[in-house]
Image (spheres, rainbow, N blue to C red):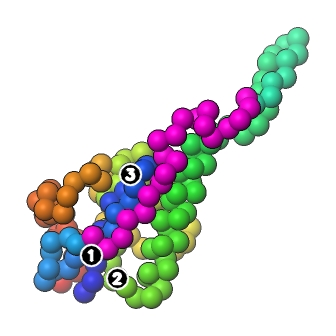
């Protein structure tokens, strides 16, 4: 049984392959979000419009920031990649390990695309190498795989 572990944060996503027989993760792919570290001012050129009246003041435009849109676009790219490989039967089960602030966005996007997640782990582990990752997630990974 072929299982994938998706480890994500706002700037990069790494996808590892492992199985019950070979539990050490091996990196299969990496998806970068080059705009993740950009400042809000780098996304937009102008300020939102404002309207002032005698009673109140309000702003025009969406409440979502450009960074929020960037995260939505990024999770959509991740979801498309996973969906494509799922349709090609490249893996059987998916475990998602993501920074807590990104995990909700990933779940939402995966639910929209009907991608089943075996287990989610709210941890920010994207900078670990394969050996350290295996050590940190050994019990979570081995307990999650179907027998």
Residue 12 at least partly seen? yes
- Which mark is first along the chain, 1 or 3? 3
Quarter of the C terminus within the rendering? bottom left
Query: Mark 3: which secondary structure?
Result: loop
Check residue 37 for magenta coloring: yes
Which residue range is magenta in the image? 27-47
Determine which quarter of the picture holds residue 68. top right
The residue lying toward the viewer, choosing from 31 and 65, is 31
Disc 2 from disc 3: Cα separation: 22 Å
Q: Quadrant of the N terminus?
A: bottom left
Query: Per the image, is 84 magenta?
Result: no
- Left-right relation of 68 to 15: right
- Report the residue marked by disc 1: 17
Secondary element type, mark 2:
loop
For the residues labelled 3 and 1, the Cα–Cα distance comes to 18 Å
Q: Which mark is residue 91?
A: 2
């Amino acid at each position: 049984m072929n299982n994938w572990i998706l480890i994500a944060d706002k700037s990069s996503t790494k996808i590892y392959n492992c199985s019950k027989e070979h539990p050490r993760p091996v990196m299969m792919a990496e998806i970068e979000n080059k705009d993740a570290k950009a400042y809000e001012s780098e996304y937009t050129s102008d300020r939102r419009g404002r309207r002032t009246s005698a009673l109140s003041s309000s702003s025009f435009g969406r409440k979502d920031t450009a960074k929020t849109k960037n995260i939505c676009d990024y999770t959509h790219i991740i979801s498309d990649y996973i969906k494509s490989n799922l349709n090609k039967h490249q893996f059987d089960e998916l475990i998602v390990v993501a920074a807590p602030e990104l995990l909700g966005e990933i779940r939402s996007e995966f639910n929209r695309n009907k991608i089943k997640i075996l287990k989610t782990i709210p941890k920010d582990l994207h900078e670990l190498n394969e050996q350290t990752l295996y050590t940190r997630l050994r019990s979570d990974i081995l307990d999650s795989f179907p027998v």
